[in-house]
Image: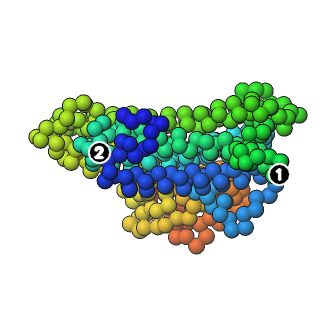
Amino acid sequence: MFDETEPWETSVPADLIQAIKYLRKSFDDIQWGCGQTTKVFCYSRLHAEEVDDHSKQHFNYLMYTKARIGPAATARFHDLVKQGTPPAIFKAFFDLYCDGVSVEALRIFQELSEIGRANQRSLGVPFLDWAEAQTRHVVRAHSHLVNIWIRDVCDKQVYDPNDDDDEHWFWRKWQAPKLLLMTPSRGKPYEPAAIWERYDPPTSSRFLNAFARDYVHRIEARVRKASGQAALALAKEPTGPRTDSGASAEPTSSQSTSVTDAPATTPRVTTDPEQSDPQFSHTEDYRSLRFRGEAYTLTTRQAVIVELLHRAYLSGYADVPKAKLLGAVEAETSEVRDSFRGSPLWKTLIRTGSRRGTYRLAVGDGQLE
């Protein structure tokens, strides 16, 4: 396994360099988009300022991020925002930032696993270990951005011509507000009068580094779990002897077909429940679905609502309150039907629930007409 202080190319065969560059660029894009959007909204909430977003670029990306992280993480985000305290607001957007990047890290790991499995013989190490190490490398390469994100959600740097270039770039004199360490962000008691009191620069630097480590540990924990799940799935495959799941011996010519004869891809490491109705299917992000034999493309808001309703159905509690659906799409003052205006899915796939003010999906026994 390669040393993570070395360039990532060290452990990548030459013919795979371009593919890995593409994946790293994809991670860059998500990291930037998720970081910028959460930063803009977090700053506006902490400082009670309106978001300058006339093009709806940040709003649309916020909806996209919520759709990607799923209803459970989105619900946690809204619960924190509703608390209304600066520490809760900071935690809500910091967690959203981490969750958004985590989803992309898992996707990158999945892609790397499939690349590694297809090229196992040229790697020299088990492909899951290789994929996990490559994902870990790209995550850690971006951890310094967390420090910048935290400073930028708390303050705007004021230009001082007396500061040197090092200060302009790294803002080493920045002092962290005490709200960062108050509950629920961290463990110190919440003291409203002290939220904007400041720590000294050295202490602030230590806190920034602690948050950056937290970001890395969260994402890496999810990747490790995904790697373990993939290894478990591979161990259950009814194939003969193989080396691609972790054995140290080189494959013989008679065994070398174990990679290509196995399923074409590494088992998908997703926690999404299996789809349970033959007349309803969807993509991972719910932006595309099939219903009663017809294909549909959904808007971001529609995808968030359909995912919430579908997961509620799969959990055994199909009815979802209107307030929960509208809160998930930041449209509390509108109606659910407004998000489906002109859509043939309204009153076909999206139906009123058994209780007043609730909605459900028309899937399952007795629901499809």
Image quarter of residue 255: top left
Q: Say which of 250 and 255 sits in front.
A: 250
Disc 2 marks which amino acid?
Arg
- C-alpha span from label 2 to label 1: 54 Å
Q: Is residue 324 left or right of residue 21?
A: right
Q: Residue at x 43, y 56 (%)?
A: 22
Residue 188 appears at what percent x and percent y? 76, 26
The percent coordinates of residue 326 (x first, y second) are 66, 55
Mark 2 highlights which residue? 117
* Image height of 321 relative to 175, above or below: below
Helix, strand, or loop for circle 1? loop
Q: Quadrant of the N terminus?
A: top left
Residue 123: percent from the left, percent from the top? 29, 42
- Of pointers 2 and 1, the one earlier in the residue sequence: 2
Amino acid at pointer 1: Pro
The percent coordinates of residue 105 (x first, y second) are: 48, 45
Q: Quadrant of the C terminus?
A: bottom left
Residue that badge 1 annotates: 161
